[in-house]
Image (spheres, helix red, strand yellow):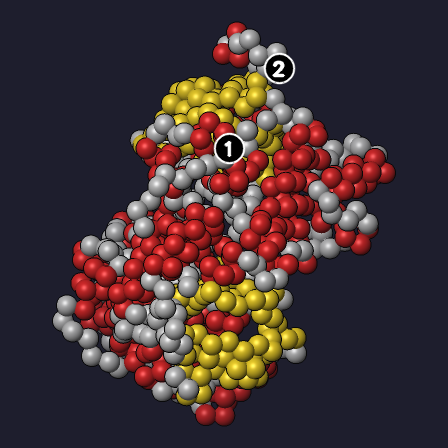
Amino acid sequence: MKRSIWRQPTFLIGFVLFAPVIAIAVAGYLLAPYDPIAYVASPFSGPSEGVRFGTDNLGRDVFSRFLAGGMWLVVFSLSATAIGVTLGALAGSALAVVGGRIDDWVMRLADSVLAFPPIIVALMLLALFGPQGWVIVGVIAIGHMPRTMRVVRAAAQSVVARDFVRYGETLGTPLPRVVVADVLPNIAGPLMVEYGIRLTYSLGLIAGLSFLGLGVQPPLPDWGNMINENRLAFVIQPWGVLLPLAALAMLTIGISLMTDGLSRWIGNIETGGRGG
Amino acid sequence: MADVNQEHTTPDSLVVDRLTICAGGRRIVDGVSFTVPRSELVGLVGESGSGKSTIGFACLGLLRSGVRREEGRVLLGQLDVLALEPDAVRTLRREKIAYVPQSAGYALNPSMRIGRQLADRLSADLPKDERARRIAAALRDVALPDDPRFLMRWPHELSGGQQQRVAIAQALLADPELVVFDEPTTGLDVQIQHQILQLIARLCAERRMSGIFISHDLAAVAEICERMVILRDGKVVEEGSTAEILAGASHAYTRELLASVPSLARTVAAKAAAQTASAGDTGKADTVLAVRDMSIYYRSHRAVGPLSLEFARGRTTAIVGESGSGKTSLCRAIIGLHSHYEGAVALDGERLAPRARARPIPQRRRMQYVFQNPWEALNPRWTVNRILRQPAEVLGLETSPGYIREQLEAVRLPAAYAQRLPDQLSGGERQRVALARALGLKPDVLICDEVTSALDVSVQATVVKLIAELQRELGLTVLFVTHHLALVSELANDVVVLRQGMIDCHGPVTDVFATPPTEYTARLIELSPGLESFGYRAPLQES
């Protein structure tokens, strides 16, 4: 740990974009001037005194709805990513260590899961179970798993071929220990990037589902369904679309920059070079 | 200016004049001057970090980014190589100076067929049949087939020696005045190394080409170079004709370097003397490890065997052979890393499970393995402390409170190293840590797989000495795999020569080396590089 991560400029810029959006998503509802589902003024009225960003299609305060509408999106995305990528990474590195026939079979299975577009599966299951949080998180996490498995397995294979892993094998190190102590720390860079990419995908997918009316149900506010509700009046009252859109953009760009910076930082503290 | 005034009838092909190169404020090359006479080979000798590769690259007009010439010149004829415009540098490299890299395996483009790769070196203006003719001629020069089938092959389909020949052919195509050879024989086994060295010497003589031969292997340099320049920390320690330096090096560092080159003749004599002094120590043959009727397979291909071997307690057995002879496969099968074999491995008469994981803890503790490449053998994310604790933790064994300090002490490393990460250690230090890790649980059998081949000569000597000392202190049974015969004579009691997966001969080192029982072994010994055959006389050593 030679240099603090905070001195890595890419990460810092990413964090500056990411942190305020997350703060709003998590704690914004505490600052909301109105009840997000209360009628405030006539629908689609522009910004005015007390109603800073105007009202939405049903005359509710856009700003209050914006402040209160990020929570579930962020919570669902983070948990879907955490579950999907973590399980995928564990499975991928375990397969790289085990190899052989088991590896072949599980990867073919993963490939067949890959063949289903996650959005279609999500639509199907949500139609079946109704729009519930655990279904959304579960479907998206399972959608991430095979993809993460592929990436992590490839990265882990080059670690597994190295002699320090072989040394562990001569001691008879149990598989979970090889994965956690030997493999994962040495693929931290690509793994961080994977978390970042999957998080932005989750955000996009979940916001998309919500836009289609399959996420948080009206009248509760959500950035995805806000965009849908207010897009018709975009020309006369753009704030109902612009605020959630800007938040999503900042979040996505922020996450990408942060993971970029993070993997570069990990690369820097890794082995400097090899003589010669 | 230097070359014009000299009275040589043949002007020097290359003059390096007070060259000083800096990287990040540090002088990595410091006032180096030497000349390369026309059609001669000059050896640039030094350990890692001595600046020899940087000088080699500078002769090509190439400085790594962040590296800067502070002073001095590299003159090729009248041309100051380091002051050329990018276009002129390209012309220079295309027409006058060629480069042969250390590891042809990495230097050849893996996704380009050999023919395309060679044609790339030639001007596209040449007519097609003229290009084909030149490529065929270059391939014949390096003793490779020139038929179309060979040209269609991929680099990975060639052996290490063939790859190196292709790299040399590539350099020859430009018909250069000077070739920079950057450790072209490192990593090749004895026979191939000998062939490549002879090839380089022959080509330089025939084509009146001059060459710079960069190496840490004094024996290789002595074999083919007329002159050598000894470098240390970017400075020239000594320069002169090979014969003069071998006959009487004036600088202490050179003498040290010469003495650390392992040599067959020297040590066999010493060993024979020592053995007659303490005769009868071979009497009790107490077998600790036995391999019975073993055949090792890769898929359906039998790589080793069938063979049977016994290893006596407290003795060091060297396992020798060329690459592909099965020495590493044999060790991996014994330790339980490669389980696809027939036959049996027995430790103290108990048959071992093929996979290490399936063996009971005491068996896993009693056999330990040290790997070839110290850059790969330690987890780069772990501190030395954690690395040393790993075996005890995995096997669930207790260690004493001073364990880490004792282990570091045993391999002659300071206790403060416990907090370091592997990339803060040199190659030799890493190999010591790997040894400490293996010896921590007091094993009975230590398997060393080419543990010195990735190290500099002088570091290699200290690691070998350490293994020999630890072997005596702890009464270890050591299996020492190597392709370096001179090391065998220094370290081992017994030797097993493997050839294409079979035992060529097996016996005490002194017997085998004094009167090789087979033709193959005799030839291996004959080709083994040492300095004696080039006129070096070692100072007398205390036993």
Q: Residue at x 49, y 54 (%)?
A: B484
Q: How many marks?
A: 2
Depth check: give the residue in front, B173 or A139: B173
Depth check: give the residue in front, B513 or A218: B513
Earlier residue among tags 1 and 2:
2
Q: Which residue is mark 2?
A: B10
Q: Is residue B408 above or below residue A87?
A: above
Q: Is residue B185 visible?
A: yes
Q: Position of residue A257 (x, y in %)?
A: 38, 56
Depth check: give the residue in front, A96 or A206: A96
Judge left or right: residue B355 versus residue A112. Answer: left
Judging from the image, what secondary structure is the residue with disc 2 in? loop
Q: Position of residue B485 (x, y in %)?
A: 50, 55
Q: Position of residue A132 (x, y in %)?
A: 40, 87
Chain of the residue displaying label 2? B
Q: Residue at x 39, y 70 (%)?
A: B282
Q: Residue at x 41, y 29 (%)?
A: B248
Q: Amino acid at mark 2?
A: Thr
Q: Which residue is mark 1?
A: B43
Label at residue B222:
none
Q: Are dots 1 and 2 on a single chain?
A: yes
Q: CA distance from mark 1 to mark 2?
A: 20 Å
Q: Label 2 neighbourhood size at 10 Å, few (<14), some (14-19), many (20+)?
A: few
Judging from the image, what secondary structure is the residue with disc 1 in? strand
Q: Which quadrant of the structure image shows residue A76?
A: bottom left
Chain of the residue displaying label 1? B
Q: Label 1 neighbourhood size at 10 Å, few (<14), some (14-19), many (20+)?
A: many
Judge left or right: residue B473 versus residue B488. Answer: left
Q: Which quadrant of the structure image shows residue A93?
A: bottom left
Judge left or right: residue B362 versus residue B508. Answer: left
Q: Amino acid at mark 1?
A: Gly
